[in-house]
Amino acid sequence: MHKLTTSTLAALEEMLQNTARSAPHDFMPIHFSGGPQNSQVIGHLNPEFIPYLQESLNKSPIAHIQMDHDRLSILYSKPIHLSTSLTALADRMRQGGFIPGWRHEEFAWVDQNGHEYFRLERSAFRTFGFRSMATHINGYTKAGNIWLGRRSETKTTDPGRLDNLAAGGIGADETPWVNARRELWEEAGVPSQIADQIEPIGRIHMRRPIPGRGFHDEHLYIYDLEVADNFIPTNHDGEVSSFIEIPFSEAAARILADEFTSDAAFVTADFILRHSR
């Protein structure tokens, strides 16, 4: 039903084998030292930011933050204290012009056991290379088409590029399920009785350097949602400029033509491969 060439499928599979890239060798590691973490590397700092931050911290130290020649260390403390210190650090980086698109929204840094250790302005996560979380929802029809949104040209990140039907960062007080349903309404106008039918699929770990910025490290929680053939998405938050409904084969071609955000390209490629076997 969904005709995709062998070479196209192979290209998508190869792309999905490279979702998690290592930080460039010249990026400074950020260590979480002491406590249960026992000096774990939790972020990476662009070398272009290092001189400014070193000068700032030498002039005015911040509690629980220590910078040496080869690492930036976050010293273990209660989450409320770490959040305060990291917010002060991020504010300095913002004043230096290293954190564009300040959102006034918080992400939480959560360890592998689900424990939260600090909260921080979401736009600062990429600057420091901290791992964040997001949901991506594939909206598709029985007729064999997939819905894609085109990001607003006013977006700070990836303006004008193709995205999933809905996608968004998971806030500090949200679960992936809650976030997915909220994003479906805000970005695509999907009512709750339909959003309740989302199907959890899995998770992709996305890691990549961002030229001139920082390091993007994010867990993408994936959901599928079958919508009626006559469904028309409607954006409510101004973050999507338009929507298109296209066959899987065209979506694959647009992925390989680099029309998607990096995150949505991986999520959509995964969807196409699962539905083409």
Image (cartoon, helix red, strand yellow):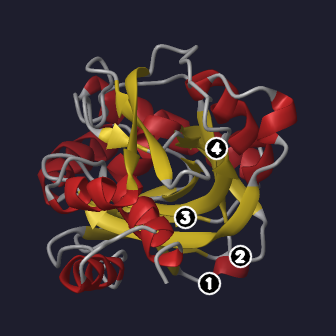
Give the foreground label among 2 and 3: 3
Mark 2 and mark 3: span between their CA atoms? 24 Å
Please give the residue where the numbered disc 1 appears in the rendered image. Answer: 38
Please give the residue where the numbered disc 2 appears in the rendered image. Answer: 35
Taking the spot 22% from the left edge, 53% from the top edge, the residue there is: 254
> Which badge, 3 or 1, comes first in the chain's sequence?
1
- Residue 47 is labelled as none
Name the secondary structure under disc 4: helix
Taking the spot 44% from the left edge, 21% from the top edge, the residue there is: 239
Residue 61: tell me if it is visible: no
Please give the residue where the numbered disc 4 appears in the rendered image. Answer: 83
Circle 4 packing at 10 Å, graded few (<14), some (14-19), many (20+), is: some
Q: Give percent across and percent down for residue 262.
A: 31, 56
Please give the residue where the numbered disc 3 appears in the rendered image. Answer: 219
Mark 1 is on which residue type? Answer: Asn
Q: Give percent across and percent down for residue 25.
A: 17, 79
Name the secondary structure under disc 3: strand
> Disc 4, disc 2: CB below 8 Å?
no
> Which badge, 4 or 2, comes first in the chain's sequence?
2
Mark 4 is on which residue type? Answer: Ser
> Disc 1, disc 2: CB below 8 Å?
yes
> Which badge, 4 or 3, comes first in the chain's sequence?
4
Taking the spot 64% from the left edge, 45% from the top edge, the residue there is: 170
Give the foreground label among 4 and 3: 3
Mark 3 is on which residue type? Answer: His
| Occupied quadrant, residue 233 | top right
Q: Give percent across and percent down for residue 95.
A: 29, 24
- Left or right: 43 with respect to 231? left
